[in-house]
Image (cartoon, helix red, strand yellow):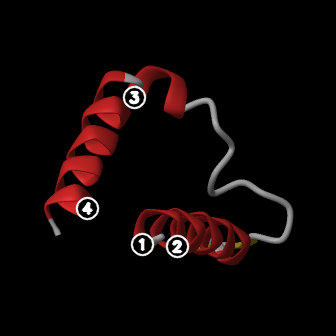
Amino acid sequence: MQLILLVSGLILIAAGLGWRWLARIPFGHLPGDIHIVRQGFSFHFPIVTCIVISIALSILIWLLRR
């Protein structure tokens, strides 16, 4: 449990320090993300981004539990 908290904290610190460069990563604008724009209406559902983040977190958790 302590290892997970430590690693999570380090990841958050790294993300905070690298926020400027993280904005350049196209998450939320990947091919397959749904974006519908109509007059007076806008809908954005980043399905592919959610799947990519889920897979990355699953692999990270799997590696930490080994």
Mark 4 residue type: Ile
Q: Which mark is residue 4?
A: 4
Q: Residues within 10 Å of mark 1 (few under 14, many from 20)?
A: few
Q: Find disc 1 in the rendering and name its residue.
A: 65
Q: Looking at the image, which is closer to me, 21 or 61? A: 61
Q: CA distance from mark 1 to mark 2?
A: 5 Å
Mark 3 residue type: Trp
- Of tags 4 and 1, the one toward the viewer is 1
Q: CA distance from mark 3 to mark 1?
A: 28 Å
Q: Find disc 3 in the rendering and name its residue.
A: 19
Residue 51 location, quadrant: bottom right
Q: What is the secondary structure assignment of the residue under circle 3?
A: helix
Contact check, label 1 and label 2, Cβ < 8 Å: yes
- Could one spot residue 28 in this view of the protein? yes
Q: What is the secondary structure assignment of the residue under circle 1?
A: helix
The extreme right residue here reads 31
- Could one spot residue 41 in this view of the protein? no
Task: Give coordinates of residue 61: x percent, y percent.
Answer: 46, 70
Q: Looking at the image, which is closer to me, 51 or 42? A: 51
Q: Is residue 5 left or right of residue 64?
A: left
Q: Looking at the image, which is closer to me, 22 or 13? A: 13
Q: Is residue 33 above or below residue 27?
A: below
Task: Give coordinates of residue 18: x percent, y percent.
Answer: 41, 24
- Image point (51%, 33%), residue name: 22
Q: Earlier in the sequence, mark 2 or mark 4?
A: 4
Q: Is residue 1 left or right of residue 26?
A: left
Q: Find disc 2 in the rendering and name its residue.
A: 62
Mark 1 residue type: Arg
Q: CA distance from mark 2 to mark 4?
A: 12 Å
